[in-house]
Structure formats: structure tokens, C-alpha cells
Amino acid sequence: MAGRVLVTGGAGFVGSHVVDALLTAGYSPFVLDNLSTGRRENLPPDVPLYVADIRDGAEVDRVVAEVRPRYVFHLAAQISVSRSVREPDYDADVNILGFLRVLEACVRHGVERVVFASSGGTLYGEVTHPATEDSPLRPISPYGLSKLAGEQYLAFYARTHGLKAISLRYANVYGPRQDPHGEAGVVAIFTRRLLAGQPPIINGDGRYVRDYVYVEDVARAHLQALAVDLPEPFAAFNVGTGVGTDVNRLEQLLREAVLTVAGDALPAPPPPPQYGPPRPGDLRSSILSPDRARQVLGFEPQVSLPEGLRRTVRWFAEHR
Ligand SMILES: NC(=O)c1ccc[n+]([C@@H]2O[C@H](COP(=O)([O-])OP(=O)(O)OC[C@H]3O[C@@H](n4cnc5c(N)ncnc54)[C@H](O)[C@@H]3O)[C@@H](O)[C@H]2O)c1
């Protein structure tokens, strides 16, 4: 029996793919989510969903006591960088205090291992070569600061309370179920516009480089983080591809994917992109080295960017 796993934020984009991967691997997933950005429809109907807020310590404790998970994946978060700038107290409330409530409940109820969804891009900042886990951490937004604090609290709980703890520092995750209304979902936003016959709007000159990793590859890294035997109580791993792609190239690849997957259903070829003003504060370049995850977890990104984009377009075309 592979074990019971509580996934906080499991009704969201990444979390729901993690739930799918757990089911496929024979685990029993349970979800705690307040449905602020997550959706019930993202989950298979038979997966138990506890609608609760991680800021409510008594509720979190009740859920963990009832589920009695062996493992906890913590993905619930305030994910908007710009909201974190406008409302740093809200960001810290969810991403730091909420996480502490989850960790307290984990300690009280004997959880063996906690895996935390961290963010490589916001932790390392501007990097032109793939950042390794030993690169300097220099978050500049409250969101980045709260992810860094989350990692450090996690390391503290691991050292002090005997948990095993792993932080997965994601690159830019894309794929089916991504919310196009969010600000980080450039793939989802462009896909929606191309399918609707509208021009994608590229910010600035479009030479902003990111490391795009397919969501099912990210989900698989979570399972590998359960299986690995680590000597130390806490470890962090990048979950990316080591390959940078700029927005101009991404737009071309997406356009090709749309024409391949949905071209016959479009009334006309999508119009060319338009260029808008740059977004203040956007990093020029963010790429993560997957070498440590490859060596220690056995992580290997399996879905190439063109293939991942085709799968994403197919999903959006079916869910328009
Ligand atoms: N998508 C990316 O590219 C990316 C990159 C780096 C890190 N991350 C991290 O991955 C995790 C998942 O992000 P996502 O992209 O799937 O976003 P998402 O918004 O789809 O998922 C977040 C989930 O958390 C839930 N949630 C939010 N606040 C909550 C609260 N107070 N109590 C309970 N549930 C709450 C939401 O309803 C949602 O289901 C987050 O921790 C995010 O910071 C994502």
C-alpha cells in the first residue's frame, strides 16, 4: 500500500496533476483547498476534497487528524507576484502563517514527509545560465520572500521535529488546466487568444527568457520526492529543464501547435502578435538546472516544449 497523501492546493492547476499522478501510482490522495483559484472540476469525483483555508489552524488540524496522511504535499498558496506587492500582509498570511499551520498539524499527527512547492524563478532572480540549488537566493518580491521563508521554516521543522522535508523549486509550469486569468500563465493566455482568432500581446520586445516545464513532468517529480532516501532532513531541488525560451519563440511554437491541433476548426489563421509595453519588474532571464534532481531523484523532463504545447492547445480547444 503506497499510502495516504494530503495535497493542499490540490484543486489547483499543478495540484490536480499531482493528484492524478498519485492515483496512477497507487497512492490515496486527499485534497485540502479553499477553492479560491482551484476548482472541484479539476479533480476526479471520487477524490475526497476538504474545502478549508490553511489560515484556519483548527480546520487544518481537524482535516489532518481525520485523513491521517503519511505524506503532505503543500501547494496551497497565494501565487500572484503583483498581489504580493500590493498586499504583502495577505501574501505572508497565506504563504507563511498558513504553511506554519499545516506544518504544526503535520508534527502533531505524525506526518513522515512534507514536500513544498517553491519557486526557482523568484528565489534566484535574474540568471542567464541555469541556476543550481547553490546559486545565491535573492528574492525581490514579497511572494519570493514568502517562498524563501517557507523553505526555511520547513528546514527548521525537519531539523527540530524529525520530519523529512523536500522543497521543489519549480520553473515556469505550463499545461492543461492552467488558469489564463492569472498573470503567470503566458501559455494559457496566448493559447486562449490564438484559438479565439485574437493576436497575442507580447510585453516589451519579447526577449524575456524562461524555463518552461510541462505540468506532468512536475507532478512526477513529487512522486520521486516521496521515494528518495535522503540522509539529511531537508533538501531542495530545481524542477525545470535547463533550457531557456524567449516569449517571441514561445509564441511561434504555440502558433504552430494551434495550427497543427486546431487549424481545421479555425475560421482564419490567427493574426500576428502585437507588442505592448514592457511589464515593470519582469526578469530578463530565468533558467533552472535540473542536474541535482536528475542525479538524486531520477527526474528527467520527458515532454518537449513543442509536444507539451500541442497537448495544452488540445485541452484548451476541447474546453473552450
Ligand atoms: N504555476 C507555476 O508556474 C508555479 C511556479 C512556481 C511555483 N508555483 C507554486 O505551485 C503551487 C501551485 O500553483 P498553481 O500554479 O497550481 O496555482 P493555483 O492557483 O492553480 O493553485 C493554488 C491552489 O491553492 C488554493 N489556495 C489558495 N489559497 C488557499 C488557502 N488560503 N487555503 C487553502 N487553499 C488555498 C487555491 O484554491 C488553488 O487550488 C503554488 O504554491 C505556487 O506558488 C507555481
Image (spheres, grey):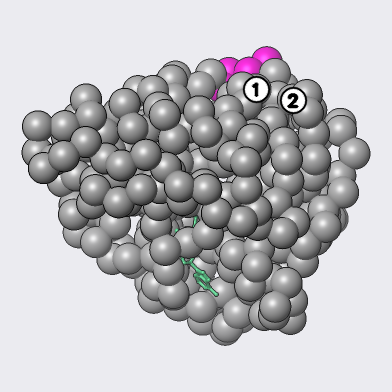
Residue in the image at 54% along x and 37% along y: 247
The quarter of the picture where the N terminus appears is: top left
Taking the magenta stretch, the answer to whether it contains residue 99 is no
Determine the residue positioned at 44% across, 25% down. Answer: 305
| Numbered marks: total | 2
* Image position of 264 (left or right of 295): left
Measured in 3D between alpha carbons, the distance from the residue under mark 1 to the one under mark 2, in whole angstroms, is 6 Å
**Res. 242 mark:** 1
Q: Earlier in the sequence, mark 1 or mark 2?
A: 2
Question: What secondary structure do most residues of the magenta stretch adopt?
Answer: helix
Q: Residue furthest right?
A: 136
Along the line of sight, the residue nearer the viewer: 70 or 197:
197
The location of residue 15, given as percent across then percent down, is 44, 52
Residue behind mark 2: 130
Q: Position of residue 118 (x, y in %)?
A: 66, 49
Q: Is residue 39 visible?
A: yes
Q: Which residues are magenta?
A: 294-299
- Count neighbours of disc 1 (C-alpha within 10 A) and say few if under 14, some if 14 to 19, many if 20 or more: many
In the image, is residue 162 above or below residue 258?
below
**Mark 2 element type:** loop
